[in-house]
Amino acid sequence: IGAIKPALVQVTAVPNPTNDNTSSYTFFSTLSGTISYGGSCSSSTTSATADNNTITFNALADGPYSNCKISVTDDNNSNTSDNLSVSSFTIDITAPTLSSVTIASNNSVSTLAKTGNIITLSITSSEALRVRPSVSIAGQAATVTGSGTSWSAAYTMTNSNTEGSVSLNIGFSDLAGNAGSAVTSTTNGSAVQFDRTSPVLQPVDNVTTPTP
């Protein structure tokens, strides 16, 4: 009668992507024994129980991993399980950046704005973002649209906004959860000046025509 070898099954995969370069992974083994690792992954954990087993992989560099394998050799009969292939995952511990941020007004002069004008930020990120970036224009929450690496934020100026250069603030994070440094300026030097004060004509005095 052939000896029984351990059977392994994945329980909890490594999140994909993840910003934890020492990620945890859980598998179930039908028998206790010694763990062996294959591919790019390794761990200081070398003993498995006949139960769920959570291991922590040794530190991995940024990048995709699709060749990691685990096997268990049982303690009693030295029979080795079939290789368990770890589901593919990507390590990303690099914070995203914004490669392009520009600002413009829908005023006939795009660098100027008055009450009622719409200010638009055009945003391009270095990698896909996890959720919509959090954007404020003139200190107020902007409406954000877009996806992936291309985004737009808009805000309509009101009488309550402060005159002068229109401020901006962009908060963002990538798919792995790495937060980028908040951006408060454009990448091309563009700016919009807000003026909510209507012009006033000063009184004009009548001028008497001299009598010849």
Image (spheres, rainbow, N blue to C red):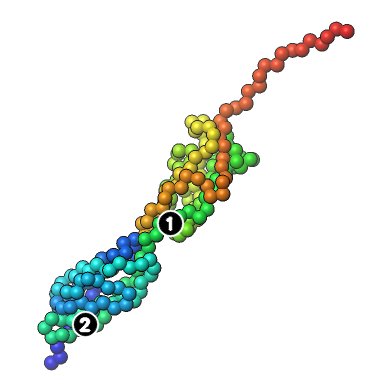
Q: Is residue 72 left or right of residue 60?
A: left
Q: Quadrant of residue 111?
A: top right
Q: Residue at x 15, y 91 (%)?
A: 2
SS under mark 1? loop
Q: Is residue 115 above or below residue 34?
A: above
Q: Residue at x 36, y 57 (%)?
A: 177
Q: Is residue 143 left or right of residue 71?
A: right
Q: For the residue carrying disc 1, how many other residues have a C-alpha within 10 Å: few (<14), some (14-19), or many (20+)?
A: many
Pointer 2: what residue?
81
Question: Residue 93: x and y, percent?
Answer: 36, 61
Question: What separation in Å lies between label 2 and label 1 (alpha carbons)?
Answer: 41 Å
Q: Quadrant of residue 61?
A: bottom left
Residue 115 can be seen in this image: no
Q: For the residue carrying disc 2, how many other residues have a C-alpha within 10 Å: few (<14), some (14-19), or many (20+)?
A: many
SS under mark 2? loop
Q: Is residue 204 above or below residue 50?
A: above
Residue 141 can be seen in this image: yes
The type of residue carrying mark 2 is Ser
